[in-house]
Image (cartoon, rainbow, N blue to C red):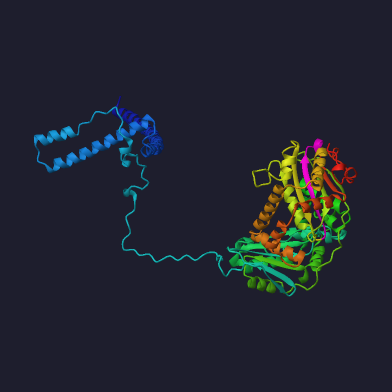
């Protein structure tokens, strides 16, 4: 072979060898690093465990400890003594001339002592014998050198949000001012957020056949005042949000924003309330949304809507809140503008504010709503309760359950028994069989104890109230498989009948009143709920009822009040609503309308 070929072969062979060796070393290093990491983690774990165990051994020397701990402490002490002796002898050797005796002494002192089979007294062991935890300080070699000769100016941070702190000068009572016919109430609260809400006495009970669906459309178009403004983007830049809610009695629009941005957010809020142009393109988009929502309402919502139509047929409160699909096409921009011109007047608007000074709230309302026309509230015809039945088949029900609700007439917000009715609702309580959670969430309410815990087939049982300005209902709704819907209905009637002839216990009544007081006061801690409560009470009572007065009325409720409310409610005909895939087992209104107490009730 020639020299060039031999040289090339040698180079190729050694190159391959170097590459293989490098790869092997890299793999070995990776394995070693992994092993070292695992050993460190294992060592740290052992160190923590030994520290805890040896600490117990030192604190409680008379107890029996594992032999490994005892041996560990003994060996640790021996090493400490050995190291101490070595250091002492080394210092002596440095300070003493080299002599045979000193050398012999040093040699003798550094010899390893024979381990003793008897463990030492742990109480005499120093605390320094415990294994020390690993140091968390970084090595000094990786720390940057200190800066010398550099002086930095002091840093002053300005608060991004001006937070009102609680103090002696904070407003603790609701202040009310009439601003050219618009009643404005406010309550200052600590924090960096402010809520403004306006309530208009305009709900679905004022709708007629030609204006059906206008309230729902107003709610959905609250963020489209027109004029090409991008309201959501502006609200995001201000840290604010606007939300609207329509009901049978009123229509509310609220804004929640940062305290510093309340003036700018209030302008958008007012535009959403009063300045809507309701352009044809926006109205068509709103109608598509209404169709999508109303064609897929959940079963509980259909049950409640059916209850109102059954209790008040052909009455203002019996009007549907959600626009029927056949009436969606009749919603137009001109009808929305006409609705606003009819109801949005000074005497029919109420403003509530939370988290803002009262003078500032009055100034905002006086400036922004200066162009609102004057006018009194719009009257409405009273709704007369008659009772009845609503049945709706749902062949494509998702959970396959049949839902039944039975309700009776009680007074509305102005009724003399409004507070006892609320106590009765809390006493019955109830809920869904999968939402028990724990004590404090209604597990000790009557419907949980006597229906959900005893009837395995009951999927839900809950008491509800539907109060309005001139009328109200109290009822119980439940859910079960279709084959047990008859048993469910009679269980509901049995609970009402038992209340009419059997007094509630002192424990039940006390628990219900405590829970109701807690719920009222806890809800008022929220700015949004506080502002909404102000405007709704202004519209309903013309004033704000103090929470202390509400709690006093709750405390005054007796067992006789509960019994009297139940007897009065069952003296009239019931209202029945049933929704589900199969309603064959549900009792009809004719079968239940004569039930007045336990003598008329036979539980199947």
At which x and y percent is residue 372? 75, 72
Quadrant of the rendered image containing residue 393: top right
Q: Residue at x 76, y 71 (%)?
A: 346
Q: In the rendered view of the protein, which quadrant contains the N terminus?
A: top left
**Residue 285 visible to the viewer:** no
Quarter the C terminus occupies: top right
Foreground pick, 29 / 90: 90
Residue 528 drawn at (x, y percent): 66, 60
Q: Is residue 423 left or right of residue 9?
A: right
Q: Residue at x 81, y 46 (%)?
A: 501
Where 67 sits versus 230, above or below?
above
Viewer-proximal residue, 345 or 508?
508
Question: In the rendered structure, does residue 462 fall within the stretch colored magenta?
Answer: no
Location of residue 265 in the rendering, given as x and y in whole percent from the top left corner: 64, 66
**Location of residue 328 (image quadrant):** bottom right
Tell me if residue 165 comes above or below residue 20 in the rendering: below
Q: Main secondary structure of the magenta part?
A: strand
Asked if residue 487 lies left or right of residue 511, the reply is: right
Q: Is residue 473 magenta?
A: yes
- Specify start and end residues of the magenta stretch as a single range: 470-484
Q: Residue at x 72, y 59 (%)?
A: 553
């Amino acid at each position: 072979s020639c020299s060039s070929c031999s040289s090339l072969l040698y180079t190729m062979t050694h190159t391959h060898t170097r590459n293989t060796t490098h790869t092997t070393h890299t793999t070995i290093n990776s394995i070693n690093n992994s092993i070292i990491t695992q050993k460190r983690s294992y060592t740290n774990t052992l160190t923590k465990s030994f520290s805890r165990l040896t600490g117990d051994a030192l604190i409680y020397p008379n107890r029996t400890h594992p032999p490994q701990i005892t041996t560990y402490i003994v060996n640790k002490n021996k090493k400490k003594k050995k190291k101490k002796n070595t250091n002492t002898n080394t210092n002596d050797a440095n300070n003493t001339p080299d002599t045979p005796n000193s050398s012999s002494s040093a040699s003798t002192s550094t010899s390893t002592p024979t381990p003793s089979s008897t463990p030492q007294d742990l109480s005499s062991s120093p605390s320094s014998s415990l294994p020390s935890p690993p140091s968390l300080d970084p090595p000094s070699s990786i720390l940057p050198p200190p800066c010398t000769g550099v002086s930095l100016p002091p840093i002053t941070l300005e608060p991004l949000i001006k937070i009102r702190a609680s103090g002696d000068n904070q407003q603790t009572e609701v202040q009310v001012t009439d601003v050219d016919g618009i009643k404005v109430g406010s309550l200052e609260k600590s924090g960096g957020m402010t809520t403004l809400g306006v309530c208009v006495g305009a709900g679905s009970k004022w709708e007629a056949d030609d204006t059906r669906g206008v309230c729902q459309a107003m709610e959905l178009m609250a963020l489209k005042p027109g004029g090409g403004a991008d309201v959501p983007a502006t609200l995001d830049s201000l840290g604010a949000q606007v939300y609207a809610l329509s009901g049978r009695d009123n229509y509310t629009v609220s804004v929640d924003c940062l305290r510093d941005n309340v003036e700018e957010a209030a302008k958008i809020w007012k535009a959403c309330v009063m300045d809507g142009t309701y352009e044809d393109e926006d109205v068509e988009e709103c109608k598509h949304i209404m169709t999508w929502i109303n064609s897929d309402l959940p079963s509980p919502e259909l049950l409640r809507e059916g209850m109102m139509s059954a209790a008040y047929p052909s009455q203002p409160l019996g009007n549907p809140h959600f626009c029927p699909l056949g009436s969606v096409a009749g919603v137009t921009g001109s009808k929305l503008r006409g609705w606003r011109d009819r109801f949005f007047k000074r005497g029919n608007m109420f403003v509530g504010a939370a988290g803002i000074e009262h003078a500032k709230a009055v100034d905002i309302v006086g400036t922004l709503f200066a162009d609102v026309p004057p006018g009194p509230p719009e009257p409405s015809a009273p709704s007369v309760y008659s009772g009845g039945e609503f049945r709706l088949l749902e062949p494509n029900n998702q959970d396959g359950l049949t839902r039944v609700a039975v309700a009776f007439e009680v007074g509305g917000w102005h009724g003399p028994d409004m507070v006892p009715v609320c106590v009765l609702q809390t006493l019955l309580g109830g809920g869904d069989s999968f939402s028990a959670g724990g004590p404090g969430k209604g597990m000790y309410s009557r419907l949980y104890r006597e229906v959900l815990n005893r009837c395995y087939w009951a999927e839900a049982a809950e008491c509800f109230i539907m109060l309005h300005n001139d009328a109200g209902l109290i009822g119980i709704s439940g859910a079960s498989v279709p084959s047990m819907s008859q048993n469910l209905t009679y269980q509901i009637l049995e609970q009402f009948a038992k209340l009419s002839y059997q007094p509630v216990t002192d424990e039940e009544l006390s628990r219900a009143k405590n829970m109701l007081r807690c719920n009222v006061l806890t809800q008022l801690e929220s700015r949004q709920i506080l502002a909404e409560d102000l405007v709704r009470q202004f519209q309903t009572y013309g004033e704000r009822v103090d929470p202390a007065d509400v709690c006093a009325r709750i405390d005054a409720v007796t067992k006789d009040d509960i019994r009297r409310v139940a007897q009065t409610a069952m003296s009239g005909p019931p209202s029945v609503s049933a929704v589900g895939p199969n309603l064959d087992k549900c009792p009809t209104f004719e079968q239940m309308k004569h039930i007045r107490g336990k003598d008329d009730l036979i539980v199947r």
